[in-house]
Each structure stands twice: as C-alpha cells, then as structure tokens.
Image: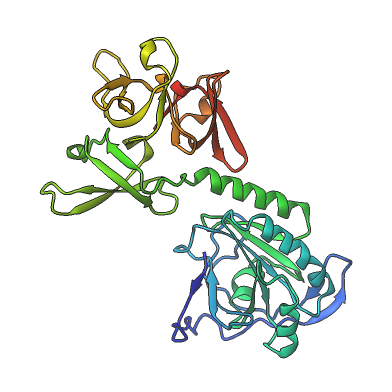
C-alpha cells in the first residue's frame, strides 16, 4: 500500500544508529548480479527473514516527481508489494527491468504494486535512464534516507543486486532473492491467489435484508443497502440502514452470511414443486422468510413482474439468479472445502442446471442453484 508524506515527516530515533548504508561496485560474481558492499549498521531488533513482517520503509523519493512514498509497516496491508533493488551501473539490474515490467503489467489490476529502488543520487543521467524505462508500471524511487537498505537489504544479508522482495497483502515478507529466479514468479503467483481468494466480490449499492444476528438481533429483518467492503481482510461488508426513528441512517459491518440480497430479475426455474404456470416467469426478490422450526429452509418472496399482486415463496433451488450475482457456496459434499466461499455467478447452463461461479481470478466452480445462497 502506498503512502505519501509531508516534508515535515518526523525523523527516526537518532540513537538507533548514525551509520548509513553505502553501496560500492566490486567485480561481478557471474551473470546474475553485482556484488555490493554495505557498511555495517547496528540493529536494535533481530534480523528479518522470510516469513516475518515487513517494517515501514519510508523516505523513498519518486522519480521524477520527487513525491515521498513508502510501503510496509503494520498499518499498511492491503496490497502485494514487489520491491527490486537496482542501480544504473549494474548491467544485470538493467537486464532484469524488462522482466520486472512484464510482471508488473501482468498483475496491474490484481493488487500488486512494484517499486524499483536505487541508492544513487538524483542526477540528470538517472532521470534520463528512468524516463526510458517502463515507469508507467514500475514506481522508480531513490532510497534517499537509506531505509530500504537498512530495513530490508542488510537484515536479509543481501550481498548483491538486483535483489527483490515480495511482501504479501498481510505485510509478510514472502520472498527475498534474485527477481529472475523461478521462485520469484511462483511466490508472487501464490500471493496473488491468496489475496484474491480473501477478497470479497463487489456488492456496493445492493439492497439486502439483515438476518442471523445474535448480539444485534434487533437488526434482524431490517432492509438496508451495501455501501462497500469493510476493512481489508475483515471479510465484511458495510451496510447502511434507516434508524429506528426514520430520520437518519446508521451503518454496520456484517459478514455475507448475515445478508440476504434482494435480487432483481430472477427467473422461476422449471423444476418440481413450482406450478407450471409460473415456470420461466421473472420477478424480484422483495424479502425472505426465516427457516421454519420443522426443518424447512429459507424461502425468498418473489414478486412476479407479470403480476405485481402475485408473490411466490421459493427456495434457491427453484430460482435462477442473473449473472454477476454474488453468492455464498453451501451444502457441497464432495467439494466441501468450498462451502462458505463467496463468488460471482458468471453463467447458468439450463441443460445441466448449474451455475458457473467465479471464486477467484484463477478458480471457478460449477454448482446447482440449491448449493448457494445470496
């Protein structure tokens, strides 16, 4: 997650160390990178390794704007961060940049931010080089305060560049090594898959009926509107609903299983239990009836479009919802691991009687209408 700061940013505790890292070019050690030397620095905490939280790295001056950027820290999860340490005088670094740009473009709209970090001084030569690079997808920055070197490179015992780190959406360092190694791509793909699996589909503006609440049972049955997702990683939506006096709005963050969507343009399925004269009819869900004590499931009240006075009480297995409806998977036996997953309906196949539900960018599931709630 990227943060910008004002020039008056508070300086770090000067008692930690007065030393600053310095890079010096020395002979190559093969085709992968350039060996560098970093002046020793005293660390007040244990050395970082893969699997630990990434500290806040700030004081990064964007090229060419000069805007101060940062990433990491316990308060900045939500995006996957890739940072590559490089220098213009390092041929392997320059050769790795097209690969980094290719990765950045591949994950451009999937929660990945890419930084190219150099410790070089700002100069016209540096500005000119960056201008010739894919700076539309890579955030090229100068490690002006040395925090990138001090907080990442040295604790990782990184002795050469290029050297890349991958920080997942929870702020955990998942990779430390050369950006051209196979492990880099594999780790990044895994981080993106995990991130997307944990993301809730967009549900903003949808009308919902609240249900199943225990601590806030007085809200059960209320109808509200989804404002948007809750805090990153919370797995909740923020719902706005009218106050008791009807003179204002209040809001609450709820899980998908506490929301019933008032879905429009549903189709009555041609299945057993549905009167033939209503099969194939369309209508809108106007509310829900709780599951009965005798074991009956929850029923949707569907107001038919052809006759506003006719309201049918139907189970999900007797309805077909339109594409892009957000659904929660339930009742699976052979693929029980997917129960509780939230996805989006992509299509409905009338021949097989199954939805194709998109659970993540890389995973789809084919399920019957009776195996989902909305």
Residue farthest to the bottom?
124
Residue 184 in percent (x, y) is at: 72, 55
Vertical position of residue 165 compared to residue 303: above or below: below
Residue 261 or 121: which is nearer the viewer?
A: 261
180 relative position to 107: left or right: right
The residue drawn where x is 66% and y is 65% is: 156
101 relative position to 296: left or right: right
Residue 144 or 197: which is nearer the viewer?
A: 197
Residue 357 in percent (x, y) is at: 53, 33
Residue farthest to the front?
306
Residue 14 in percent (x, y) is at: 49, 85
The residue drawn where x is 22% and y is 52% is: 250
- Asked if residue 277 shows in the view, the reply is yes
Residue 16 or 286: which is nearer the viewer?
A: 286
- Asked if residue 178 shows in the view, the reply is no
Location of residue 276 by image quarter: top left
303 relative position to 95: left or right: left
The residue drawn where x is 33% and y is 37% is: 259
The quadrant of the image that shows the C terminus is top left
Vertical position of residue 103 compared to residue 279: above or below: below
């Amino acid at each position: 997650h990227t943060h910008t700061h004002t020039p008056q940013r508070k300086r770090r505790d000067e008692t930690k160390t007065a030393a600053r890292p310095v890079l010096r070019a020395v002979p190559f050690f093969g085709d992968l990178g350039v060996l560098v030397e970093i002046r020793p620095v005293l660390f007040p905490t244990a050395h970082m390794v893969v699997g630990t939280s990434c500290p806040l790295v700030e004081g990064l001056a964007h090229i060419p704007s000069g805007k101060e950027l940062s990433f990491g820290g316990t308060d900045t999860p939500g995006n996957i961060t890739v940072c590559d340490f490089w220098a213009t005088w390092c041929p392997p670094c320059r050769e790795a940049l097209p690969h980094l740009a290719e990765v950045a473009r591949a994950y451009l709209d999937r929660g990945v931010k890419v930084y190219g970090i150099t410790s070089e001084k700002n100069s016209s030569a540096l500005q000119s080089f960056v201008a010739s690079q894919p700076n539309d997808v890579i955030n090229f920055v100068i490690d002006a305060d040395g925090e990138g070197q001090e907080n990442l490179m040295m604790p990782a015992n990184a002795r050469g560049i290029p050297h890349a780190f991958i920080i997942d959406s929870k702020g955990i360092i998942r990779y430390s090594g050369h950006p051209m190694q196979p492990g880099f791509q594999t780790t990044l793909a895994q981080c993106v898959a995990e991130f997307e699996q944990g993301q809730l589909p967009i549900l903003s503006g949808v009308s919902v009926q609240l249900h199943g609440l225990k601590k806030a049972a007085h809200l059960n049955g209320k109808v509200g509107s989804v404002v948007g997702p809750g805090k990153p990683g919370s797995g909740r939506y923020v719902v706005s609903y009218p106050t008791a006096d009807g003179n204002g709005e209040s809001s609450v963050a709820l899980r998908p299983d506490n929301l019933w969507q008032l879905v429009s343009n549903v189709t009555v399925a041609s299945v057993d239990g549905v009167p033939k004269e209503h099969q194939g009819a369309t209508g809108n869900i106007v509310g829900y009836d709780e599951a009965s004590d005798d074991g009956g499931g929850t029923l949707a009240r569907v107001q038919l479009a052809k006759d506003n006075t006719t309201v049918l009480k139907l189970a999900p297995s007797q309805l077909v919802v339109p594409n892009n409806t957000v659904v929660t998977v339930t009742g699976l036996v052979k693929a029980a691991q997917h129960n509780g997953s939230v996805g989006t309906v992509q299509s409905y196949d009338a021949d097989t009687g199954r939805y194709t539900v998109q659970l993540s960018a890389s995973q789809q599931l084919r399920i019957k209408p009776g195996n989902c709630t909305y």
